[in-house]
Structure formats: structure tokens, C-alpha cells
């Protein structure tokens, strides 16, 4: 590429003119780089602050000017924070909810999505319109009546309200996402299955599902994130300490430890870490989900 | 002319009939879920609107009193004011930052993915952990925000104790997560075919002209769409308001859904909370219709994959 550019400049008489235009170009790139570096430093400051605070001994937390390298480096903060409240149990509860949600959403949303994408039948567009309509209703609008309903079922202080409803469609957005994905797969594959005498459910399960791994991964990632981060759901429905999730555990930890910032930062770091790890392992699907929701939404 | 009766057309023996049955089997989870988790609560919400009910004593029919009360409820207007102010500042600002950053990051440079990651990561921090972290950052004596202010010789600010600073503090917090928009714009920018820019180069267009006449028009539907989605999401901010300031000081951060939550679960006014829910619903519906009316057809439905 650069070799090619050089020969053209040699051939043409405008060598000097090109050299001049190249300098501002480099200057421009330099400016962009400078802005990006400054911005990146600002953006990572809260993270740096979080991690530094999480390693400080309590007496060093309230020192001005702050020490940027904790002395001594206190790993025990993590041990202390995570045993002060039973975070191991909270983690187990959260994982239980996450596993149930993943099973519910991946099966149910892909199943419905397949029906909307690949089968023509009267009334389909009407029902799909309802999928889109429910997509627009914010959680908070139905929060109170749903709470009344679930409390009538006797589901308060159980995991039922946080898991069971997802077995019914798995959320409008996920249905929508699977539908879009199934529509992009070639029809010939399904036809081949039909010729071989496969039922529609067989086509869905044996032909289409193996092909929709990217969509499954994207939905799985966002299901994990949602359940891991969810605050309002557990706040409404989980009452007993032994039922708490990590999110609600951290929130109550904050209310009882209002000034123990070193322990609070250790617990927060511990809650953020899995999400960041997940991001590095499944970066693609994060971006895919965002782009799908942002552009295709 | 012979017409086939619908029951014959869709009987089990015809292809159309088998298809219809298969179709309804596939979407049946959604239909059931819609009826149970959506339609029933929605009906309850309608009924609740006309009741005075604290969940304990029997509900009492009060007509439109709950709706009328909205007008004279100072806290309702305060929560509208807080949420609107927050939205009007944080959403456009976040959008602008996200778009400008996407422009900067849309260059071929070694190590650019490192920058993209650094800018994106704050947006995936769990809300509760984020709230705890920012409560510490805005700590008056030893928080990072005031450490930074002191470093440049400015006086410290009582971020979370002064009514006029609490909301700006939460806006700053929300701007930290502007990277999620950046990713979406980046995808939009990368979807613009190079030929447009090549054609502009031949015509001698400069950087600004290309931005003004190619880039912005082509990503504008995405920007506008994200603006509306951002506004809708911003109207539902809850965790930060509850965990960092709990609505205070002096209701300066009483976000709309936080007020709704309190009405229902602390003051136990179920009927009035339903009235508040309808207002939220109305706001979202108006915004959504706005999207469909003005950009519905203009959004690019090109396959991203």
C-alpha cells in the first residue's frame, strides 16, 4: 500500500503538494490520539479509584491527599467484606435465578421467535403486533398490579416472580431478536427438512436451533447481565436475607456499612469483576446485542 | 363462485390448517404469557386507578379522585421536574459525547480497540455497584470528585447534601456510561459505504463537508432513535436515585419511578400509584408514536451481520 503510494507520487509532478497535505493529516491523527488518551484517563479514573480504595486499610481511606498506592496493600478487605454478609449464599441464589432464566428465555423466546419468523398463518401479524406493543410498556407501569398478583399467589419472598414468567415467551425483546435471526436463515434448509418428513418442531430443534448459536449467545449474555444487575425485582420480591441476590445484598451492605468505604469498594469490585470478565470473553455478543437493539429495535 | 368455508380451509387435512396449528403451538407461550403477565395486570391497573387501597383494608371506590389529585400533588410535579431536568441534560449530552467519540474512534489506528474497550466498560457496570462507587466518589471530604476539584484549586462541593448539586452529580454519573451509545454509532458509521466518501473526495470535499453532508444524514436516524430510547430509559431511572441520595436532599433527586415506588410500597397508596403509572405510560406512548411517525420508515433495516 505505502509502496504503491510512493510510486504514484514519484510519477506525478505534485510531489510537494502531497507532502504538504500529509502533514496536517498526521497532525490530525495526533490530535485525535491526544483527545482519546485524555478521555480514556478520565473515564478510567472511577475504576482506578474503586480498586485503590478496595485495597486500603480503613484509616487510610480518610486521608487527604489520597494515597494512590495503598500502603499496606490490604487483600483482607475482600475476605472481610464477603464474609460480613453471606455473599457466597447471595451468589448461589443469583446463579440459581440466572440458570432458570437462561433455560426459560433461550427455549421459550426462540420457540416463539421461530413461529413468528418461519410459519405463515392467519393472525400471526396481529400477535406479532402485540409482541411489539408489550415491548414498549415499561416495567414500572405494571410493577404494582404484578406485585399484587404475585403476592396473591403467595410468591413474595420466593424466586418464582423472578423466574417463572420468563417461561412464557421470555420477554418481547428476546422474541423479536430471535425472529429477526430466524428470518435471516435460508428457507431451503427448512424445505430440505420438510422433504425428509421432519415435523415443524423437528425443523426448529434439529435444523434451525444449531444454526442460531450467535443469537442464543447474545440473548444468553444479556439475560445474564439483566439478572446479575437487576435491583428492582429482588427489592420488591425478596425479603429474607437467605433469599437475597448479590445486587440486593450489596445494596443492604451499603445501608449497614455507610462509612466503611474500603469494604464497600471491595464488595463492589467483586460484583463488577464477573461482568468485566464476561465482556472480555464474549465481547462480540455484547456489541451484537447493542447494535441489534439500537439499530434494528 | 365457490367459497371454501374457513373451517374447511384450515382443517387438519389441508396444508394451511396444519400450518396454522403449528404456528399457534409455536407462539402459544407468548399468548399465554401475554394473557397472564400482561393483560391481567393491565386490567388490575385500570381497576386500581379508581380505588383507594392500602393492601390491608378492603379497597374503596373513589372515582377519578386519584387522577384529579395529580394536579395538586407537589411531589408529583417535583418528580416530573427532576426527571425531566435529568433527561434533558443527560440524554442529549450523552448522545453528543457518544457520537463525537464514535467519530474519533472510527479511524484505522493501531490499538484503537483498547480505547473502544476503555470507553465502553463503564456502561456495563451493574447499577447497584455503580451507585455504591459514585456515592464514594461524591463523598464531600474524601471523594474523588472533590479531590479533583482541590487539585485544580477549586473549593469543595457538598455534592450529595446540597439540593442544587445532587442532581448534577447524578447527571455526571450517568454520563460516565455514554460508551454504550458510542458502540451503536460506531456500527452505524461502519455501515456507511466507502464509495460515498470516495465520491466526495473526487469532488474535493473537506472533512467538515463530508461530516455534514454524508456522515450525519446517514446516521441521523440511528441518533434520533437512540435519543427517544434514551429518553424512555431515562424516565425510568431508579437505582441511583434510591441508593445514592434516596430522593433527597429536599426531594432534589426524587425521580419519577422512585416517587411511584414510594407511593405504592411505603405509603401503600395502590390506587394513586396506578394513576402515576398511567402518566408514565402516556409519556412513553407519546414518545414512541413520535418515533414511528417521524423515523419509522427512515431507519436503515440493513442486515448488521
Image: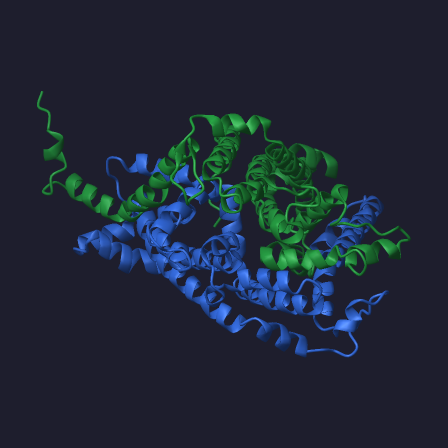
Q: Is residue A256 left or right of residue A234?
A: right
Q: Quadrant of residue A42?
A: bottom right
Residue A252, above or below A179: below
Looking at this view, is B23 or B69 the one in front? B69
Q: Quadrant of residue B256?
A: top right
Residue at 67% x, 79% y is: A76
Q: How is the image coloured?
A: by chain
Image quarter where the N terminus of chain A lies is bottom right
Residue A293: where, in percent of width, then height? 50, 46
Residue B82 percent across, percent down from the top left: 65, 37
Nearer to us in this view, B60 or A118: B60
Task: Please identify which colour was used for chain B in the image.
Answer: green
Q: Is residue A176 visible?
A: no
Question: Residue at 16% of width from left, 55% of height from top?
Answer: A197
Q: Is residue A117 above or below residue A221?
A: above
- Is A290 or B256 nearer to us in this picture? B256
- The residue shown at (59%, 55%) is B127
Residue reaching furthest to the right: B153
Residue A114 spot, x, y in % from top left: 31, 49
Image position, residue A260 (x, y; %): 70, 67
> Left of A229 or right of it: where is A41?
right
Does residue B234 appear anywhere in the picture? yes
Q: How many marks?
A: 0
Using the image, determine if residue B248 lies above or below residue A198. above
Chain identifier, blue in the render: A
Toward the front, the furthest residue is: B57
Quadrant for residue B77, please give it. top right
Front residue of A209/B52: it is: B52
Viewed as shown, does residue B260 lie left or right of B141?
Answer: left
Amino acid at each position: 500500500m505505502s509502496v504503491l503510494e510512493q510510486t504514484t507520487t514519484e510519477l506525478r509532478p505534485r510531489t510537494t503538494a502531497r507532502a504538504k497535505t500529509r502533514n496536517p493529516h498526521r497532525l490530525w491523527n495526533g490530535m485525535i490520539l491526544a483527545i482519546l488518551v485524555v478521555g480514556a484517563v478520565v473515564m478510567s479514573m472511577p475504576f482506578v479509584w474503586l480498586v485503590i480504595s478496595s485495597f486500603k486499610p480503613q484509616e487510610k481511606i480518610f486521608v487527604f491527599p489520597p494515597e494512590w498506592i495503598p500502603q499496606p496493600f490490604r487483600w483482607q478487605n475482600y475476605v472481610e467484606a464477603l464474609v460480613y454478609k453471606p455473599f457466597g449464599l447471595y451468589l448461589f441464589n443469583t446463579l440459581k435465578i440466572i440458570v432458570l432464566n437462561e433455560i426459560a428465555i433461550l427455549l421459550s423466546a426462540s420457540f416463539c421467535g421461530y413461529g413468528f419468523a418461519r410459519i405463515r398463518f392467519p393472525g400471526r401479524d396481529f400477535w406479532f403486533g402485540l409482541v411489539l406493543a408489550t415491548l414498549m410498556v415499561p416495567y414500572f407501569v405494571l410493577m404494582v398490579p404484578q406485585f399484587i398478583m404475585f403476592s396473591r399467589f403467595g410468591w413474595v419472598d420466593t424466586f418464582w416472580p423472578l423466574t417463572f414468567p420468563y417461561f412464557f415467551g421470555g420477554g418481547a425483546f428476546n422474541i423479536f431478536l430471535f425472529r429477526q435471526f430466524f428470518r435471516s436463515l435460508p428457507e431451503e434448509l427448512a424445505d430440505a427438512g420438510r422433504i425428509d418428513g421432519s415435523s415443524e418442531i423437528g425443523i426448529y430443534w434439529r435444523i434451525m436451533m444449531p444454526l442460531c448459536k450467535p443469537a442464543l449467545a447474545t440473548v444468553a449474555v444479556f439475560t445474564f447481565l439483566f439478572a446479575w444487575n437487576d435491583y428492582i425485582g429482588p427489592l420488591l420480591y425478596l425479603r429474607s436475607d437467605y433469599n437475597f441476590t448479590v445486587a440486593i445484598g450489596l445494596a443492604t451492605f451499603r445501608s449497614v456499612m455507610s462509612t466503611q468505604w474500603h469494604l464497600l469498594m471491595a464488595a463492589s469490585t467483586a460484583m463488577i469483576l464477573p461482568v468485566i470478565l464476561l465482556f472480555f470473553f464474549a465481547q462480540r455478543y455484547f456489541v451484537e446485542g447493542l447494535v441489534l437493539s439500537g439499530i434494528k429495535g | 363462485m365457490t367459497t371454501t368455508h374457513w373451517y374447511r380451509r384450515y382443517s387438519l387435512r389441508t396444508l394451511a390448517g396444519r400450518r396454522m396449528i403449528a404456528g399457534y403451538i409455536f407462539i402459544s407461550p407468548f399468548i399465554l404469557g401475554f394473557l397472564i403477565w400482561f393483560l391481567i395486570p393491565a386490567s388490575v391497573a385500570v381497576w386500581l386507578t379508581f380505588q383507594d387501597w392500602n393492601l390491608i383494608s378492603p379497597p374503596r371506590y373513589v372515582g377519578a379522585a386519584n387522577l384529579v389529585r395529580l394536579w395538586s400533588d407537589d411531589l408529583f410535579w417535583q418528580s416530573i421536574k427532576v426527571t425531566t431536568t435529568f433527561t434533558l441534560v443527560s440524554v442529549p449530552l450523552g448522545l453528543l459525547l457518544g457520537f463525537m467519540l464514535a467519530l474519533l474512534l472510527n479511524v484505522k489506528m493501531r490499538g484503537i480497540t483498547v480505547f473502544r474497550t476503555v470507553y465502553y466498560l463503564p456502561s456495563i457496570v451493574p447499577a447497584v455497584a455503580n451507585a455504591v462507587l459514585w456515592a464514594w466518589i461524591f463523598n464531600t471530604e474524601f471523594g474523588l470528585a472533590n479531590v479533583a476539584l482541590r487539585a485544580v484549586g477549586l473549593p469543595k462541593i457538598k455534592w450529595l447534601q446540597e439540593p442544587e448539586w445532587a442532581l448534577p452529580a447524578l447527571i455526571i454519573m450517568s454520563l460516565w456510561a455514554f460508551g454504550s451509545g458510542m458502540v451503536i454509532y460506531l456500527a452505524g458509521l461502519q455501515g456507511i459505504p466507502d464509495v460515498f466518501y470516495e465520491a466526495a473526495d473526487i469532488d474535493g470535499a473537506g472533512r467538515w463537508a463530508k461530516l455534514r453532508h454524508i456522515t450525519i444524514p446517514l446516521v441521523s436516524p440511528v441518533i434520533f432513535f437512540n435519543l427517544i430510547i434514551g429518553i424512555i430509559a431515562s424516565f425510568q431511572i431508579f437505582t441511583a436515585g434510591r441508593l445514592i441520595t434516596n430522593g433527597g436532599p429536599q426531594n432534589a433527586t426524587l425521580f419519577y419511578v422512585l416517587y411511584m415506588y414510594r407511593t405504592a410500597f411505603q405509603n401503600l397508596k395502590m390506587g394513586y400509584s396506578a394513576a402515576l403509572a398511567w402518566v408514565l405510560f402516556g409519556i412513553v406512548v407519546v414518545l414512541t408514536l413520535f418515533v414511528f411517525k417521524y423515523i419509522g420508515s427512515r431507519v436503515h433495516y440493513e442486515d448488521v451481520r
